Amino acid sequence: MEVAITQPLDHPHTRQQTPAGGVDAAGVLHLAMTLGPVQLGERLRALRQQRGQSLAEVAKATGLSPSFLSLVENAKSDLSVGRLARIVDALQATIADLVDDGAAEPGPVQVVRKQERRSIATGQDGIVTEFVARGLRGQIERHIMTFEPAAGVDLDDYHLSKVGESFFLILQGELLVELQGRPPLILCPGDTISLKTRDFSRSRCISREPAVVFVESVAWAPPA
């Protein structure tokens, strides 16, 4: 049986390019950007000013010095993904808020082509975080994190105030995951783990090749 196609196909080789952060005529949100130190610093400064917070206020909330925060905003210092998350958390924002710039509200359908993924490289810890998509209601964040060999993250570096849960799917390499009060786990390609964010302690790539991990995080309010 033949199927009649009455609308143009949305194919990466045939569709018109949409500006970064824009919504096309079909209500589809398209994203395209890689944040370097300059762009990341500019976004952090803009987000802080939008929230009406001073460097001193963010420093107090994060435990980082105002001078360090100023260096980051001016692209004169690198930072780890944990410290980045700590700053974003203090601004009551998300990594998605950094990469999509809030230029457009998410449409009913979100499409992010592989070549259009926005990413943040935190050279201090050897991790690249690629933004895949946020939930349609903004409560879920989805990333692909690439850990260079021996690279890792530590919950103490995050210092998060939010409570929630996370899901990891190992796509490549091996990841050592340490949880609070539990024996360490070695996760291999195809393995998954779901956990409360506060139960996480640290993770590290232990393979000779980079570890590539799909991460889905959900923030939720604790019961009263």
Image (cartoon, helix red, strand yellow):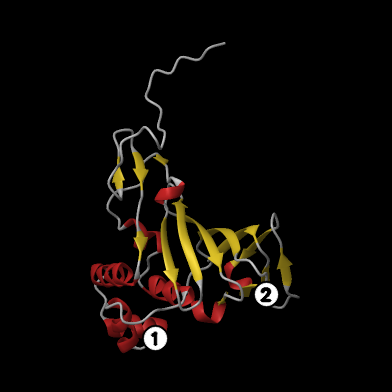
Callout count = 2
Can see residue 223? no
Residue at 31% across, 36% down: 16
Q: Residues within 10 Å of mark 2 (few under 14, many from 20)?
A: some
Residue 132 vs residue 194, the one in the foreground: 132
Left or right position of 216 against 27: right
Disc 2 or 1, which lies upstream in sequence? 1
Disc 2 marks which residue? 178
Q: Give the structural element (helix, strand or loop) at label 2.
A: strand
Residue at 69% across, 54% down: 190
Is the residue 96 above or below the residue 201 in the image?
above
| Dot label at residue 64 | 1
Left or right position of 217 against 100: right
Q: Which residue type carries mark 1?
A: Leu
Q: Which residue type carries mark 2?
A: Glu
Do callouts 2 and 1 mark residues in contact (Cβ within 8 Å)? no
Q: Give the structural element (helix, strand or loop) at label 1.
A: loop
Quadrant location, the N terminus: top right
Is the residue 10 above or below the residue 221 in the image?
above
Is the residue 81 above or below the residue 69 in the image?
above
Residue at 39% across, 70% down: 88
x, y percent for residue 50: 24, 67
x, y percent for residue 173: 66, 63
* C-alpha separation, residue under disc 2 versus residue under disc 1: 25 Å
Can see residue 206? yes
Residue 106 vs residue 144, the one in the foreground: 144
x, y percent for residue 140: 48, 55
Residue at 27% across, 46% down: 19
